[in-house]
């Protein structure tokens, strides 16, 4: 849930892997849609994305996310998949129960990971034998040339420097760049 609330494009970040969203995540996102901050904007945007995907087919059956992407499926949690001391009323536990249900359906045929920015959720997942990872796509740099350095170097003549120090507005279109 927090992954989608911090990056509504996260659905597209998993390349050609299938993405399973617990129904509880949609309920939790719905609680944030009226907020007037970035979280609210992301909640509304991710709901729009789900609505667009829904037009392609049934979310509970699986919908292709896009070209060279996997399938998106929304499912409910599995009954009796957690230890009895874990309350199924807790939203985090419902999400964990959903992951356990997916693992049971896969029967070891494919790797299943819980992706969450919630540290405690990842710890609980590990305690339940669920592989868990933090969502760090926004930190990954594929090519070091794409890293924004915060500045650019331009060779200019003395006249341009004088104009700059005189307080004239200057635009990069005026400057010759390499």
Image (cartoon, rainbow, N blue to C red):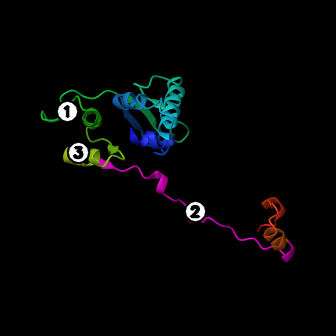
Query: Residue 125's mark?
Result: none
Q: Earlier in the sequence, mark 1 or mark 3?
A: 1
Q: Position of residue 15 (x, y in %)?
A: 48, 45
Give the residue at mark 1: 81
Residue 44 visible: yes
Question: Residue 75 or 31: which is nearer the viewer?
Answer: 31
Indicate yes or no whether the magenta region holds residue 139.
yes
The crowd level at tag 1 (other Cα within 10 Å; few <14, some 14-19, many 20+) is some
The crowd level at tag 2 (other Cα within 10 Å; few <14, some 14-19, many 20+) is few
Query: Residue 124's mark?
Result: 3
- Foreground mark, 2 or 1, reads 2
Q: Determine the secondary structure under disc 2.
A: loop
Give the residue at mark 2: 147
Is residue 5 toward the left or the right of residue 82 in the image? right
| Residue at the image point whose x is 47% and y is 30% from the top | 33
Q: Earlier in the sequence, mark 2 or mark 1?
A: 1
3D distance between C-alphas at marks 2 and 1: 44 Å
Is 155 rendered above or below residue 111?
Answer: below
């Amino acid at each position: 849930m927090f992954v989608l609330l911090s990056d509504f494009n996260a659905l597209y970040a998993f390349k050609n892997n299938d993405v399973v969203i617990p129904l509880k995540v949609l309920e939790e996102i719905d609680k944030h849609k009226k907020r007037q901050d970035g979280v609210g904007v992301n909640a509304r945007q991710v709901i729009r994305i789900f609505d667009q995907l829904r037009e392609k087919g049934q979310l509970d059956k699986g919908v292709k996310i896009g070209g060279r992407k996997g399938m998106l499926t929304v499912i409910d949690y599995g009954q009796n998949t957690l230890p009895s001391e874990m309350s199924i009323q807790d939203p985090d536990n419902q999400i964990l129960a959903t992951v356990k249900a997916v693992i049971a359906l896969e029967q070891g045929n494919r790797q299943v990971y819980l992706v969450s920015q919630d540290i405690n959720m990842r710890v609980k997942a590990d305690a339940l034998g669920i592989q868990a990872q933090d969502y760090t796509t926004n930190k990954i740099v594929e090519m070091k040339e794409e890293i924004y350095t915060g500045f650019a170097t331009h060779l200019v003549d003395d006249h341009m420097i004088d104009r700059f120090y005189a307080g004239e507005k200057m635009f990069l279109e005026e400057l010759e760049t390499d």
